[in-house]
Image (cartoon, grey):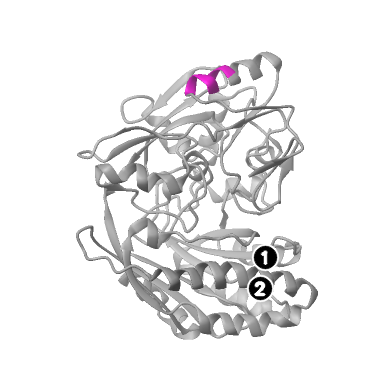
Amino acid sequence: MTRIGGTWQNWGRSASVKPLRVERPRTPEGVQRAVIAARAQGLTVKAVGAGHSFTGIAVAPGVLLELDDLQGLVSADAETGLVTLLAGTRLHRIPGLLAPYGLAMENLGDIDRQSISGAISTGTHGTGARFGGLATQVVGVTMITAAGEFLRVDEHENAELLPAVALGLGALGIIVEVTLRCVPAFVLRAIDEPAPLEDVLATLHDRVAASDHFEFYWFPHTEVALTKRQTRVPESTRREPLPVLGRWVDETLLSNGVYRAVCATGRIAPAITPPFNRLAVQLTGDRQYTDRSHRVLTQSRTVRFREMEYALPAENVVPAFRAIRALIAKRGWRIEFPVEVRFAQEDDRWLSTAHGRASAYIAVHRYWRVDPTEYFAAVERIMLEHGGRPHWGKLHTLGTDELRERYPRFDDFLAVRERLDPDRRFTNRYLERVLGV
């Protein structure tokens, strides 16, 4: 997230706004005062975290609340695993905050720059067929309602609201604290290796079942899948992390530095993309290591991009993937970013992309200076044909009617919104499109 000359921009440069006012509350009470003031002036108010959503979900044309100063640990209990964090706390800070208590988050996505409230509110997830998205780790939320009041939601207070507010799109209130159920700290044994794409597709569900965490990347114009599989082992397990130099070469030099240059050049000379993709699968993705969970689950990504991701019933992922592969070949597109495939356990969060069904995710990307419209629109049609639900924080074109068909509890969520924010204090154009006015 950046602000230039009073204009806020998200990380992917796909959304921007010049808010009427910007505030940086340092305490939950500061958030409360800002909401009360916005209400008195008839202004909308939105909180922003790290700006890592590609949609306009965090755009704040009225009052923009930057939560950069609302970070840190409120409480932690090593015995119960219950941890409460201030809403603006960045994911990459959480492992250090939990380390003294011997705790870790159960699962993480592959990027850790987001704030905890932004990550849960947009449905951020990692991979692993036996693990849900980050919102499933939430057991309590404290938020400021449109009336300017504190509202606690947990198993003891307003428990019926938890499936809505744990993944609430920022439409129900401003979250100021998040309580997570964490797990004892653990280590992951990781194997990254290339494999023939057809072999991976033919055995995909067996591979997913055999690992705690499994995903694969496919660079278009190649016949190779870069697989990543990880096994959870006790914290006492001897760690064998990647060598510092090797990690720097893979993640900084190749995956970010060289890759940024190739993406930029590919805009002018698309013909270089296929040979570079073939070279990339030869140079990366073949290594074994054992390290702390957050060191394995997350990656450093500095090349700016735009992304669309859809969740599918897990049984539909292979035919959908094959259709995307055929589409790219038929159109003759030169696609510089890999297609990513991940998995998640079904859950009960009303607007979770994995609500009520074991899910697989297919994500497509384009370099941020390349127009993704044609590619994303064609992939989106395939995703919808296979029962897809769009990630709330990533680009898509769906509106209220299409989304209602895909979420059994959609109208229940709208009823909670009507109860908590009848005057639409927390709305914006994106929320009007997906939830209605």
Q: Position of residue 69 (x, y in %)?
A: 52, 32
Measure how far apart labels 1 and 2 are at the Cα level: 7 Å
* Residue position for label 2: 336
Residue at the top extreme of this rendering:
40
Label 1 packing within 10 angstroms: few (<14), some (14-19), many (20+): many
- Picture quarter containing residue 170? top right
Q: Position of residue 55 (x, y in %)?
A: 65, 48
Q: Secondary structure at mark 2?
A: loop
Check if residue 29 falls in the magenta segment.
Answer: yes
- Picture quarter containing residue 337? bottom right
Q: Magenta region, mostly helix, strand or loop?
A: helix
At 65% from the left and 54% from the top, the residue drawn is 395
Look at label 1 and name its amino acid: Arg
At 73% from the left and 74% from the top, the residue drawn is 266
Residue numbers of the magenta segment: 28-33
At 69% from the left and 79% from the top, the residue drawn is 273
Q: Of label 1 and label 2, which has the lower sequence position?
A: 2
Relative depth, front residue between 426 and 386: 426
Please say if 144 is above or below 79. above
Q: Which mark is residue 366?
A: 1
Marks 1/2 in contact by CB < 8 Å: the verdict is yes
Residue 9 lies left or right of residue 386; in this view the side is: right
Label 2 packing within 10 angstroms: few (<14), some (14-19), many (20+): many
Which image quadrant: the C terminus? Answer: top right
